Image (tube, helix red, strand yellow):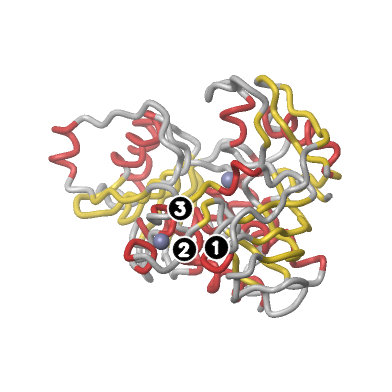
Amino acid sequence: MRGAVIHVPGDVRFEDRADPKLEQPTDAIIRISATCVCGSDLWDYRGINPVTQPIPMGHEYVGIVEETGSDVTTVKPGQFVIGSFFASDNTCEVCRAGYQTSCVHREYVGANGAQAQYLRVPLADGTLVATPDVPDAKLVPSLLTASDVLGTGWFGAVAADVQPGKTVAVVGDGAVGLLAMLAAQQLGADQIIAFSRHEPRQKLARQFGATDIVTERGDDGAARIKDLTNGLGAHCVIEAVGTQQSMMQAIRSTRPGGHVGYVGVSHDVSLPGQELFYSHAHLHGGPAPVRRFLPDLINRVWTQQIDPGKVFDLTLPLDQVAEGYKAMDERRAIKTLLEP
Ligand SMILES: [Zn+2]
Ligand SMILES: [Zn+2]
């Protein structure tokens, strides 16, 4: 088969890779229907994560089950499935508490490289969820978002304790931040404030439920949130970037007793203990346990209550994956969908 491999930062190639095979009786092999480039792939592409050897890329996927190991019982060949970027057994205590990305048996599916024609998914029973039927092509982009960015934005909103009537602020206008706004709207938030400076993203933010746009960043941004909330700060703040500035912007935008849901992959963030102590903010986040939300998110897409696939503003054939990375790196695209 063929798939995307990064050789050095900035150099993603579409090349021959070994066909994946069943390695464990709990594995499934899927034929990829659609995959995409994630904001977190850009950490490798930009050399912020070291790339010391060729690495297969991609961790967001939907596809048709080709083959299953002898222990797999919940999915079968021919079904259309969606899975998280971490495989999980979905049966251990940690999974049952809803934290499948910290499953005691977790495996990183992305290590197998989902930007390819085929993918081996470990722990298929605990990882994959089948749709009611093979979907219409028009639903595929939205279903694909459930594999990571929608599930991650949703977890950010849940971790920030979004509830009906609450005021929500979202730091980050990438796909995860935008879909956190959609999640906040679905969960009944009253006011949703988007931090964004980019006109096309502001437009999408409004479509996903944002009621206010703030273009200031850092402490100026936090001050604007206070202006909009009677001087108190937001009840719920979702952090979807992962830098020192974005994390402090989130904490300083939160009212005493409020919640920060942080889902931007943390890079060199260090928190000042005394400020945290006096903030009275709840902090919760981490790698989103997407598997927890998959059945609900699939249902919302299937019944067309939500259209998260709008975050894809570039669709390319998989063999043009290099251009997909370049367009996102140069911020010409919010998110690139790839079709094998
Ligand atoms: Zn991702
Ligand atoms: Zn588990």
Local secondary structure at mark 2: loop
Q: Residue at x 45, y 41 (%)?
A: 264
- Tell me: is circle 3 under 8 Å from ligand 2: yes
**Residue toward you, 309 or 152:** 152
148 is higher (above) or lower (below) than 251: below
Q: Residue at x 51, y 66 (%)?
A: 126
The residue that disc 3 covers is 106
**Residue toward you, 29 or 160:** 29
Residue 303 percent location from the top left of the image:
66, 78
Mark toward the start of the polypeptide (1 vs 2): 2
Type of residue at label 2?
Asp
Quadrant position of residue 163: bottom left
Q: Residue at x 55, y 43 (%)?
A: 173
The residue that disc 2 covers is 89
Type of residue at label 3?
Arg
Mark toward the start of the polypeptide (3 vs 1): 3
311 is higher (above) or lower (below) than 72: above
Residue 251 percent location from the top left of the image:
30, 41
248 is higher (above) or lower (below) than 156: above
